[in-house]
Amino acid sequence: MAVNYSAKEEADGHPSGGVGMPGGGAGAGGAVKTRKPDNTAFKQQRLPAWQPILTAGTVLPAFFIIGLIFIPIGIGIFVTSNNIREYEIDYTGTEPSSPCNKCLNVSWDSTPPCTCTINFTLEHSFESNVFMYYGLSNFYQNHRRYVKSRDDSQLNGDNSSLLNPSKECEPYRTNEDKPIAPCGAIANSMFNDTLELYRIDNDTRTPITLIKKGIAWWTDKNVKFRNPTGDGNNLTALFQGTTKPVNWPKPVYMLDPEPDNNGFINEDFIVWMRTAALPTFRKLYRLIERKNNLQPTLQAGKYSLDIAYNYPVHSFDGRKRMILSTISWMGGKNPFLGIAYITVGSICFFLGVVLLIIHHKYGNRNTSADIPN
């Protein structure tokens, strides 16, 4: 049986007739079905709107203003970044001539630890406070399972989570039927090389004071990480019934002899637990404060770096670095931001010049055409 079809009826949503509906009317008591939007300003797109009219008088000044603002800002940021002193040493030891080559195949439980010394020379003095970082390459802290492998309740000092860690910590949740504290893959792989810096004057080595406190975020140190509740002067009793992570040489309550930097609130541990977003990263290790304004923090000259090589990276083709750096109001050395500002500003200024020439040459021509009714 053929049925008449009307495109207008489908578009309006009001059928004028059909099977079982004589005269096009709806059935008794039946509602008329329609897909037509409600007659409101929002659904019928009648709300007030503003559309910019792009003319040469508005576009050209915008390009020139952006260029004149971005280029000086970019130059200032770039110069500031270049004024930051930075010195980097790769001590992985993959090269046969490296003093740390003998430690390349070290394991987590090597006793005694392998040690090596690298001598280097600073060509320029470091005037302000100096930040010592350790850097790792090809280490994917951003892996999903790695990032989730921790128990924040345990790290926040919850006693029940201390003895019953989260299942997210598997397979580093328990060891020898004892709960691991701190549990998880992040804590288990904590960086544990020891770095010591010396200045060499006339073959005499003078140790540089390295400050180990103040390297973690305040919120991490005072809010996110706390030791279990109880006698804070006896961490051994607080962590009783737990065991150390598999790859650690000693338990968490023996990380530091100072009570305010031991256990879960150890700042080296806190810094490591803040995972990096990229496989090549650096983390703050120590601070070197400037003693007075008359002398630089690190004078130009000869130095030596003593390394207790405990952290194995050769198995995953990783690399280890030590970085000495100053900072500025914009943070560490990063020329990309300045280059980006200069590039965007230059492109906008160049486009402004090109469009100005085009407008000057062709703007007075009458390009309008009569549109027939």
Image (cartoon, rainbow, N blue to C red):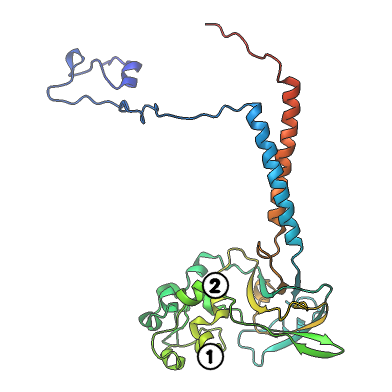
Query: Residue 338 falls in which quadrant of the image?
Result: bottom right
> What residue is shown with label 2?
217
Under tag 1, what secondary structure? helix
> What's the amino acid at mark 2?
Trp
Within 10 Å of disc 2 (Cα), the crowding (few <14, some 14-19, many 20+) is some
Q: Is residue 30 left or right of residue 149?
A: left
Task: Point out residue 20 in the picture as x, y percentages from the top left corner.
Answer: 17, 19
Q: Is residue 99 left or right of residue 28?
A: right
Residue 57 shows up from this direction: yes
Within 10 Å of disc 1 (Cα), the crowding (few <14, some 14-19, many 20+) is some
Q: Nearer the viewer, residue 62 or 22?
A: 62
> What residue is shown with label 1?
254
Residue 136 vertical placement versus 180 (above, below): above
Between label 2 and label 1, give the one nearer the viewer: 2
Residue 171 shows up from this direction: no
| Residue at image location 66% in from the left, 71% down from the top | 136
Q: How many marks?
A: 2
Q: Nearer the viewer, residue 13 or 291?
A: 291
Q: Is residue 355 left or right of residue 148?
A: right
Residue 273 vertical placement versus 355 (above, below): below
